[in-house]
Image (cartoon, helix red, strand yellow):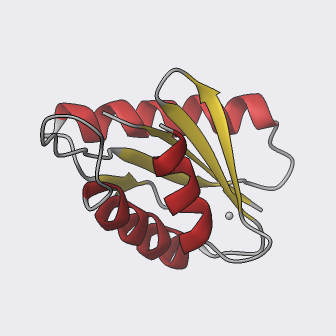
């Protein structure tokens, strides 16, 4: 798990943050990033995670993600709820994919699978 978090951190810009939310779920904070660029960044992370070797038998890791932008006057709780809904849509649509919703710093909820 630490290797994956380190790889994600190394892939991101200086001011972006990887925060473990719990279990195999991470939040990625991309301040001053528009939605399209955030989706591209998370897609790059998805590829990096898939290429991260794990000890033991060869296991291909996947990453499903929900990406959303913080709207003006919106609470963090509302944003987290929205990203979780998008995340579960990505998982339901086949996993190992990045889904977003076009709505305006940036937070992404990512569980490792």
Q: Is residue 31 above or below residue 59?
A: below
Residue found at x 64% / y 29%: 21
Left or right: 64, with 10 as reference point: left
Left or right: 89, with 23 as reference point: left
Residue 78 found in image quarter: top right
Where does residue 16 sit, x and y in percent of width and height? 72, 66
Image quarter (top left, top right, bottom left or bottom right) of the C terminus: top left
- For the residue pair 67 and 24, the one nearer the viewer reads as 24
Q: Is residue 33 above or below residue 4?
A: below
- For the residue pair 59 and 39, the one nearer the viewer reads as 59
Where does residue 28 sit, x and y in percent of width and height? 62, 52
Left or right: 28, with 96 as reference point: right
- For the residue pair 107 and 45, the one nearer the viewer reads as 45
Can residue 103 be seen here? Answer: no
Residue found at x 25% / y 44%: 61
Q: Residue furthest top?
A: 23
Residue found at x 62% / y 43%: 27
Left or right: 47, with 104 as reference point: left
- For the residue pair 109 and 24, the one nearer the viewer reads as 24
Can residue 54 be seen here? Answer: yes
Q: Is residue 95 above or below residue 104?
A: above
Where does residue 34 sit, x and y in percent of width and height? 62, 76
């Amino acid at each position: 798990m630490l290797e994956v978090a380190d790889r994600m951190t190394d892939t991101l810009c200086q001011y972006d943050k990887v925060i473990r939310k719990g279990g195999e779920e991470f939040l990625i904070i991309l301040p001053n990033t528009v939605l399209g660029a955030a989706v591209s960044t998370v897609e790059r992370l998805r590829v990096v995670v898939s290429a991260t070797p794990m000890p033991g038998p060869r296991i291909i890791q996947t990453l499903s993600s929900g990406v959303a932008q913080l709207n003006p006057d919106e609470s963090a709780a509302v944003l987290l709820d929205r990203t979780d809904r998008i995340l579960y849509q990505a998982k339901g649509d086949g996993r190992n994919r990045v889904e977003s919703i076009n709505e305006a710093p940036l937070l992404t909820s990512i569980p490792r699978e």
